[in-house]
Amino acid sequence: MKLTIQRKGFALFALGIGLMLALLLLTGAGTQEPPVGRYRMAVTVRNNFTDIYVIDTVTGVVKYLGNDEGKPFDQIRGK
């Protein structure tokens, strides 16, 4: 009788551990969305020239877009 109680207790313990591991693994599973509103763009017009600046609001880096349009922010040389 004592042996069946121990087996039942071990089975319930193992089931609890398995459920906890499943919960931990499933709550961490998800896609990482890019932050919305991280970059801002400022446009300045002087005479007939248009200057476009991109500001990274997280790091504070400001880059000038000249011939680098269409490139990712990390690849823009800036001025």
Image: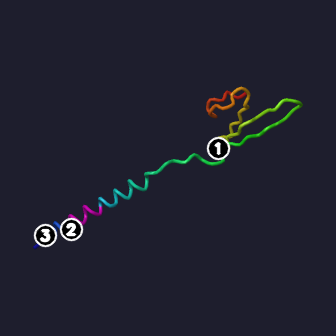
* Percent coordinates x, y for residue 68 in the rendering: 68, 28
Question: Where is residue 63, by image quadrant?
Answer: top right
Q: Which residue is disc 2 drawn over?
A: 9
N-terminal of the two: label 3 or label 2? 3
Q: Secondary structure at mark 2?
A: helix
Mark 1 touching mark 3, by CB under 8 A?
no
Give the residue at x 16% y 66%.
7
Under mark 1, the amino acid is Val
Give the main secondary structure of the magenta stretch.
helix
**Residue appearing at x 29%, y 63% in the figure:** 16
Q: Earlier in the sequence, mark 1 or mark 3?
A: 3
Residue 12 counted in the magenta span: yes
Q: In the rendered structure, find residue 58 and report the number of the disc placed on it.
A: 1
Is residue 17 positioned above or below 49 on the image?
A: below
| Frontmost residue, 61 versus 46 | 46
Based on the picture, tell me whether residue 4 belongs to the magenta stretch.
Answer: no
Q: Residues within 10 Å of mark 1 (few under 14, many from 20)?
A: few
Q: Quadrant of the N terminus?
A: bottom left
Q: Which residue is mark 3?
A: 4
User: Residue at coordinates 60% horizontally, 47% vertically from top-left?
Assistant: 35
